[in-house]
């Protein structure tokens, strides 16, 4: 295993768009420690212009400490992350990277600029 599967859905909101990211739990290196499943994910949100010359990066770390019941659930549903993204001037795409600290696996998904344009 070398890649984490990701799905991203974009929903327009009055103040931007909401990105709902689903991280495939079976692709993670979750480790059982007593009655919990543990991992740490670094999630990077990268906004870049169409030229690819300029980027803005924002990130967060997610420490997972899942009970056995939650672990069984996320194996089928995935781990959800929701983020509101405010509009930026000009066409910009978003790339989301997820880095699993336990396994060193990486997943990425790119959301094209057209997904952020108001209709």
Image (spheres, rainbow, N blue to C red):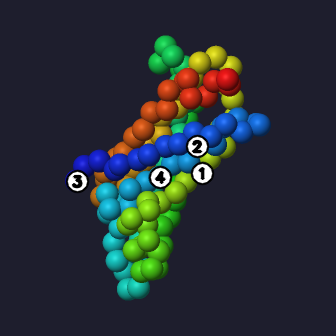
Residue drawn at x 58%, y 43% as measured from the top left? 19
| 45 vs 33: above or below | above
Residue drawn at x 44%, y 42% as measured from the top left? 97
Q: CA distance from mark 4 to mark 1?
A: 9 Å
* Furthest residue toward left: 1
In this view of the protein, can residue 44 be seen by the observer?
A: no
Q: Are marks 3 and 2 in contact (CB under 8 Å)?
A: no
Q: Quadrant of residue 24?
A: bottom left
Circle on res. 22? 4
* Furthest residue toward bottom: 34
Q: Are marks 2 and 4 in contact (CB under 8 Å)?
A: no
Residue underneath mark 2:
19
Q: Are marks 4 and 1 in contact (CB under 8 Å)?
A: no
Circle on res. 1? 3
Viewer-side label of 3, 1: 1
Residue drawn at x 49%, y 43% as measured from the top left? 8
* Furthest residue toward front: 119
Circle on res. 15? none
Q: Earlier in the sequence, mark 3 or mark 1?
A: 3
Circle on res. 82? 1
Say which of 62 and 5 sits in front: 5
């Amino acid at each position: 295993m070398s890649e984490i599967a990701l799905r991203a859905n974009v929903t327009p909101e009055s103040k931007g768009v909401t990105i709902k990211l689903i991280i495939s739990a079976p692709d993670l290196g979750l480790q059982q420690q007593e009655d919990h499943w543990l991992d740490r994910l670094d999630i990077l949100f990268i906004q870049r212009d169409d030229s690819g010359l300029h980027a803005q990066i924002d990130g967060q770390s997610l420490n997972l400490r899942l009970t056995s019941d939650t672990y069984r659930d996320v194996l089928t549903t995935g781990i959800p992350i929701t983020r509101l993204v405010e509009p930026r001037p000009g066409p910009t795409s978003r790339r989301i990277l997820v880095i699993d600290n336990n396994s060193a696996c990486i997943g990425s998904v790119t959301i094209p600029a057209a997904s952020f344009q108001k209709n």
